[in-house]
Amino acid sequence: MATLEEIAIISYQGLYKYVPNRNKKKFRDEFVGKKRYTSKFLLAVFPKYIDFEKWSKNPKNEYDIILINYWLIEVPNVGLKRTQLFNSYNGANKIINKRIKDKESKKKKENNKRLKKPAKIKVLKKNHLPIKEKKEFESEDLSKTMQQMGEEAIRNAKEFSRMKLEREAEKEKLSNQLLRSKVFEKSIDENKEVLKKTIPNQMGIKDDNSKINRLKLVIKIFLITLFIGCFLDMAFSYYEIVRYSAFISFCYLCYLGIDDKEEFYISKIWGFSAILINPIFKLTITKDFWLIIDSIWILLLVYSLFENRLKQLFKKKRNQRIM
């Protein structure tokens, strides 16, 4: 893997000729004067002195288009890393340098031969081409390879950007789904009590709460009738039956009301009533005082029967006043 220093030196050697003449000294001093090359420094210096968009249309050397495309397309997306495009430029640069050296050595040998021997006219065979045509073919092959590399780099950059957009779209979809699920959970939590009442009724299912409410209603009506009977002249056994049945029913109502938030306070009254009327530790109270207590129990039981309806009526009146 290439370090930042290698990328910086190769880029400096390849792109120095594209710096304007008036800024070459500044560019050289600023680059050479830096002891350590960082990505921040390189991303600031090269675009400052070199116009990549201008030279991408008309480069001085054909193979330089690869390095220009690397700085123009891949560096903004990927950063200063060794990519396929950078490797292709580095490899092509080495090949071209070797070819230039070979050509120079051939020219020197030919010049030495010309000085030593008189020039001889060589008859070319049909299969062989002149030297000029060979050079033209070599340059054409290089230009084609460079164009192909540049096209591949552009395709890779486009695919990379497309993949980024797809990932962002997937993230947005997931975030929207999470938000919807959270909103749905909140709405369910807020309307739990309403759903408990409405959904079983709509589906035709008998909920356990409806059975308990019916049982409460039966117990309360039974107690009201017992306490009304106490106002009549009854035998002593009737009052004993009232004591036992009222004690059991008050205990049961207290047990059911503890779990229910709406009936938590009234369940305390039913517990106190069970203690008051318990048949084990009997309280010695006159009949007139018992009748007063019975009348209070009748009123409380009647109020508990119509409590929900009374609350609904009060809410409606308040809403009408606000409107």
Image (cartoon, grey):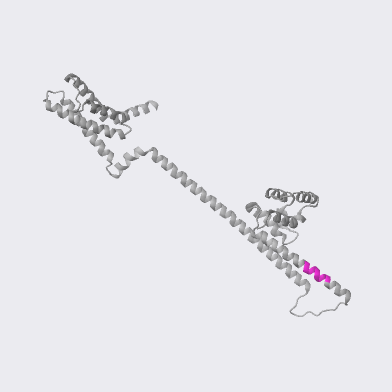
Q: Pinpoint residue 85: horizontal percent, then vertical percent.
A: 66, 59
Q: Pinpoint residue 92: horizontal percent, then vertical percent.
A: 70, 64
In-image side of 199 versus 18 (left or right) = left
User: Quadrant where the N terminus lies?
Assistant: bottom right
Span highlighted in magenta in the image? 101-108
User: Quadrant where the C terminus lies?
Assistant: top left
Relative to 265, say whether 195 is above or below: below
Q: Quadrant of residue 119?
A: bottom right
Q: Residue sitting at 33 percent across and 27 percent down?
A: 314
Does the magenta-highlighted stretch encompass residue 103?
Answer: yes
Does the magenta-highlighted stretch encompass residue 304?
Answer: no
Relative to 90, say whether 195 is above or below: above
Q: Residue furthest front?
A: 281
Q: Nearer the viewer, residue 104 or 52?
A: 104
Q: Residue sitting at 86 percent across and 73 percent down?
A: 112
In-image side of 59 versus 172 (left or right) = right
Q: Pinpoint residue 6: horizontal percent, then vertical percent.
A: 70, 56
Q: Quadrant of residue 9?
A: bottom right
Q: Nearer the viewer, residue 56 or 12?
A: 12
Q: Nearer the viewer, residue 135 or 113?
A: 113
Q: Pinpoint residue 153: horizontal percent, then vertical percent.
A: 64, 59
* Magenta stretch, main secondary structure class: helix
Q: Residue sitting at 12 percent across and 25 percent down?
A: 236
In-image side of 193 versus 33 (left or right) = left
